[in-house]
Amino acid sequence: MTDQTAPAKATPTLPDAQTVTSVTHYTDRLFAFRCTRPQSLRFRSGEFVMIGLMGDNGKPLLRAYSIASPSWDEELEFYSIKVPDGPLTSRLQHIQPGEQIILRPKPVGTLVLDALLPGKRLWMLATGTGIAPFASLLRDPETWEKYEQVIVMHTCREAAELTYGRNLVEALPEDPLIGELVAGKLLYYPCTTREETAHMGRITDNMTSGKVFANLGIPPLDPAIDRAMVCGSLAFNLDIKKVLEEAGLTEGANSAPAEYVVEKAFVD
Ligand code: A2P
């Protein structure tokens, strides 16, 4: 992991420009960065915005990114994959503190607490960079006020890909704002599928086999108490929906809250 922080450099001002304040590289495929927050931007933890860079053709090249920082944070944080030939991420991965990005200040999304009916346990189910919206929600006091237990299941191919989420989850009990709220409520179940670690396997398999419930010593899914938020690849989202529906949970939306909500982990 490498960190970069530096004073702002003078660069030409873009429309909706924000200045990058720090960049952290986790692996050769994953990085996170923080930037200034437009004063007018209000969002609900778990929502996404369009961000990007100016394209060579002079038009903004924008993609949807979940905001990984909580709604109270004075800066914004994003967590991204690096795709070598990806139109945006092939360039965005080289961004340096002091440089500018474009950020359209119009947050949207279904991965919000308001789209769920009241419940007791909240499952955060993420693959890969799908952990980003949960990085926001996990740092939001409302999450901890609304639920008696929060279970974070994050699965990646390799252990190093879990680092961003692991650092964040492990820092929660010491967090000056929410540390006390988190006490006794957080269960973390990180898994890998292509490198040997303590917990192995896909989220879907670990739920249908009952392994996660046995390992954590908790009862299986019950639509009366369980709520779930899902963020991962398209294939994962489809497969986990089946698992949740089979357990009796139904999909919610902002306009019609229910037992679970889904968002695609965007950039690919
Ligand atoms: P696997 O290694 O068995 O494919 P990716 O990097 O391809 O987005 O995958 C991230 C993680 O999500 C990997 O651990 C991968 O497991 C898992 N995964 C991919 N597709 C599915 C799916 N349809 N259901 C459950 N887990 C999945």
Image (tube, helix red, strand yellow):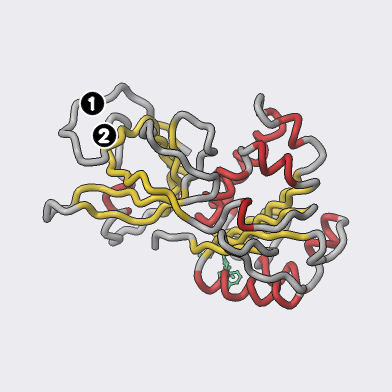
Compare residues 118 and 7 and report the one nearer the observer: 118
Q: Which residue is mark 2?
A: 99
Decide which of tag 2 and tag 1 comes sooner along the chain: 1
Q: Is residue 112 visible?
A: yes
The disc labelled 1 sits on which kind of residue? Lys
- Residue 17, above or below 227: above
Compare residues 57 and 196 and report the one nearer the observer: 57
Q: Which residue is mark 1?
A: 9
In this view, the residue farthest toward the front is 255
Give me the disc on residue 100. Answer: none
Residue appearing at x 86%, y 57% in the figure: 218
Pointer 2 local density, CA inside 10 Å: few below 14, some 14–19, many at least 20: many
Q: Position of residue 82 (x, y in %)?
A: 37, 54
Q: Position of residue 262 (x, y in %)?
A: 57, 64
Residue appearing at x 71%, y 58% in the figure: 117
The disc labelled 2 sits on which kind of residue? Glu
**Mark 2 to mark 1 CA distance (whole Å):** 6 Å
- Residue 85, above or below 78: below
Q: Position of residue 245 (x, y in %)?
A: 70, 75
Quadrant in which residue 183 is drawn: top right
Compare residues 109 and 264 and report the one nearer the observer: 109
Q: Is residue 221 visible?
A: no
Residue appearing at x 28%, y 41% in the figure: 101
- Residue 8, above or below 141: above
Ligand 1 placement by image quarter: bottom right
Q: Is mark 2 within 8 Å of ligand 1?
A: no
Q: Secondary structure at mark 2?
A: loop
Quadrant in which residue 203 is drawn: bottom right
- Residue 7, above or below 233: above
Quadrant containing the C terminus is: bottom left
Q: Is residue 100 left or right of residue 247?
A: left
Q: Are marks 2 and 1 in contact (CB under 8 Å)?
A: yes
